[in-house]
């Protein structure tokens, strides 16, 4: 049984390319609000194959910011005919296409192809909390584009949940502690850390008004996209983090077993560092 999965909103430079074993078909059809191509026909039989496909989709979303979107399922090739299958899907007889306007297409420059392949090979999502972050991040795409008038506050909460999982704070003051943790983790220099801290502080002010008093404050679109991108960068860097840094810290500080939890150690290290220190030498 041949099946495909669908990707929306990728750049033309990827059509016909082989990316980590996933062949992007030259066949292309443009709809009024989206572009899609069929990627890699495959036999969807084993859990390993399913995991590989999910990892590939996740890595495309994490590698760089874009509004890339994948079909929410797969479809069987009808009568072994790709054109017939796509036409039926387009008419809604088999598959529900997303009628969505996208903001930024997924593009890989020639010099990024090998970097993406390296990221795909090295990234790991084995830690349950990182998996949960991925699920939340993917849900941003599954819910489509923003209705900024009615649900921008809801969209803001999704990446904020990722920040709170990352900072590993169960109670107490959130804004400064989470903003600082993210700023120290992602900032490659002092100025970048400072900008991240300021962005997160503004985001948390809006978040507080929305959560505690139900005030749907007007949210700047650019700030919301920045918020999503910080969430993307956190997950991407965690997936390839150098575990030797964590293991060395645990050994040097003779941590107790209950203090060795992955996110607890990361935040202990971040608390001892400052803006621009870049203790984990993040790539994203």
Image (tube, grey):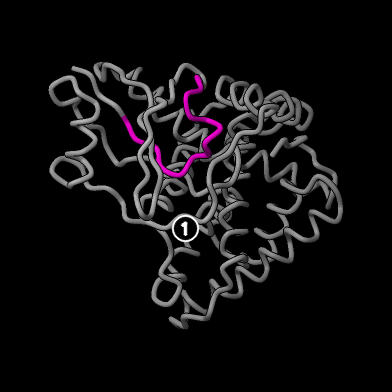
Q: Name the one closer to the observer, 212 or 117.
A: 117
Spot occupied by residue 225 in the image (x, y as percentages of width and height): 57, 59
136 within the magenta span = no
**Rendered position, 9 above or below 169:** above
User: Relative to the observer, which residue lies in front, 20 or 78?
Assistant: 78
Write down the quadrant of residue 79 in the picture: top left
Residue appearing at x 56%, y 55% in the figure: 228
Give coordinates of residue 262: x percent, y percent.
59, 35
Residue plotted at (65% across, 21% down): 114
Q: Quadrant of the N terminus?
A: top left
Q: Is residue 252 above or below residue 62?
A: above
Relative placement, left or right, of 168 versus 214 is right
Nearest the eye: 8 or 137: 8
Picture residue at 43% right of the left edge, 45% below the top:
138
The quarter holding residue 38 reads: top left
Viewer-proximal residue, 82 or 228? Answer: 82
Q: Count neighbours of disc 1 (C-alpha within 10 A) and say few if under 14, some if 14 to 19, many if 20 or more.
A: some
Instruction: Give the side of residue 206 with respect to residue 91, left or right.
Output: right
Left or right position of 104 against 178 = left
Res 46 quadrant in image: top left
Please state the extent of the stretch shown in magenta in the rendering. Answer: 5-18
Q: Does 76 appear above or below 207?
A: above
Identify residue for label 1.
Answer: 158
């Amino acid at each position: 049984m041949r099946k495909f999965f669908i990707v929306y909103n990728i750049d033309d430079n990827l059509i016909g390319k082989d990316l980590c074993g996933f062949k992007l078909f030259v066949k292309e059809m443009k709809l009024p609000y989206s572009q899609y191509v069929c990627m890699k026909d495959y036999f969807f039989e084993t859990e390993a194959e399913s995991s590989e496909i999910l990892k590939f989709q996740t890595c495309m979303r994490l590698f760089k910011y874009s509004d890339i979107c994948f079909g929410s399922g797969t479809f069987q090739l009808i009568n072994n005919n790709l054109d017939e299958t796509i036409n039926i899907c387009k008419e809604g007889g088999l598959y529900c296409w997303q009628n969505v306007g996208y903001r930024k297409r997924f593009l890989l420059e020639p010099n990024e192809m090998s970097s993406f392949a390296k990221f795909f090979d090295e990234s790991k999502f084995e830690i349950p909390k990182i998996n949960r972050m991925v699920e939340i991040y993917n849900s941003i795409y599954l819910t489509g584009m923003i209705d900024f008038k009615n649900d921008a506050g809801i969209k803001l909460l999704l990446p904020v949940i990722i920040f709170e999982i990352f900072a590993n704070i169960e109670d107490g003051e959130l804004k400064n502690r989470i903003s600082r943790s993210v700023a120290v983790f992602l900032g490659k220099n002092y100025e970048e850390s400072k900008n991240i801290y300021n962005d997160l502080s503004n985001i948390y002010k809006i978040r507080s008004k929305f959560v505690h008093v139900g005030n749907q404050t007007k949210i700047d679109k650019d700030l919301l996209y920045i918020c999503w991108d910080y969430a993307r960068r956190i997950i991407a860097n965690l997936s390839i983090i150098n575990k030797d840094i964590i293991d060395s810290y645990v050994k040097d500080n003779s941590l107790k077993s209950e203090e060795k939890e992955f996110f607890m150690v990361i935040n202990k290290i971040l608390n001892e560092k400052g803006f621009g220190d870049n203790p984990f030498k993040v790539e994203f």
